[in-house]
Image (cartoon, rainbow, N blue to C red):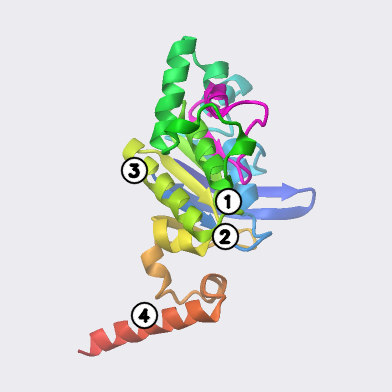
Amino acid sequence: MIEVKNLYKSFDDKEVLHNINCVFEDGKTNLIIGQSGSGKTVLMKNLVGLLSPTSGEVLYDGRDFVKMSKKEKVHMRREMGMIFQSAALFDSLSVLENVMFPLDIFSPMTLRERKQRAMECLERVNLRDTENKYPAEISGGMQKRVAIARAIVLNPKYLFCDEPNSGLDPKTSLVIDNLLSSITHDLNITTIINTHDMNSVMGIGESINFIYKGEINWQGVSGDIMLSTNKRLTDFIFASDLLKEMRETVIQHQQQEKKS
């Protein structure tokens, strides 16, 4: 579990995050959503140590990441897996070598053991027969799955995903969502996802934090969104006419059930 307490972040005189308080739970897909410029990417960078908060705490199972020494943070990052907006694969390495890369740096395993572990992760993301291909030879969706395999190869306790569905078609995005959800539950990982994808929000949003102008404006689960009275949230989620109609239909149905 990750707890964020009274977190502030400013750049010079500009405050970007204001008094952030939230909890990211084990074994759940925890989503951070919000408009571009709302502060969600800055929040994630503070969580993983790419930025340091102006003040506040980031607690990993009670351990304050902000106050750790450089050596302690390096050790802590071995418990983290990261999936970037672009798959961020190494073009010159094969799929297998990309997945093995964290093991090559951090693991005392033998070469044979590292290959076996990487193959297990590729099989977990349904890419068993692609190990000898290069990133340019596989689709964007497959590249994202390779990135997921690489992110879990060290058995992380925490998984961070920055717009994992960026650039993917709806069908492939659903595959990635389902994969992240199943890995989260099967491995009991604390998964945190930054996303603009409303299908992800409604499909796998077990715990959602909506950020508006640097503040947590709403917290809940996907099932609560349809009936939320938070105008900022509903304006963001139900931007299209079709989604607005869906929400109105759900509300009308709920009202009819109450009357009956």
| Residue 115 in sight | yes
Q: Residue drawn 58% across and 23% down?
A: 74
Quarter in which the C terminus is drawn: bottom left
> Sequence-wise, which precedes: disc 2 or disc 4?
2
Residue at the disc numbered 4: 250
Magenta span:
77-102
Residue at the disc numbered 2: 196
> Sequence-wise, which precedes: disc 4 or disc 3?
3
Is 258 colored magenta in this rendering?
Answer: no
Residue 36 placement (x, y as % from top left): 66, 60
C-alpha span from label 2 to label 4: 22 Å
Q: Residue drawn 60% across and 48% down?
A: 43
Which element type, helix, strand or loop, lies under badge 2?
loop
User: Dots 1 and 2: beta carbons under 8 Å?
Assistant: yes
Q: Amino acid at mark 4?
A: Val
Which element type, helix, strand or loop, lies under badge 3?
helix
Residue at the disc numbered 1: 163
Residue 96 placement (x, y as % from top left): 52, 26
> Sequence-wise, which precedes: disc 2 or disc 3?
3
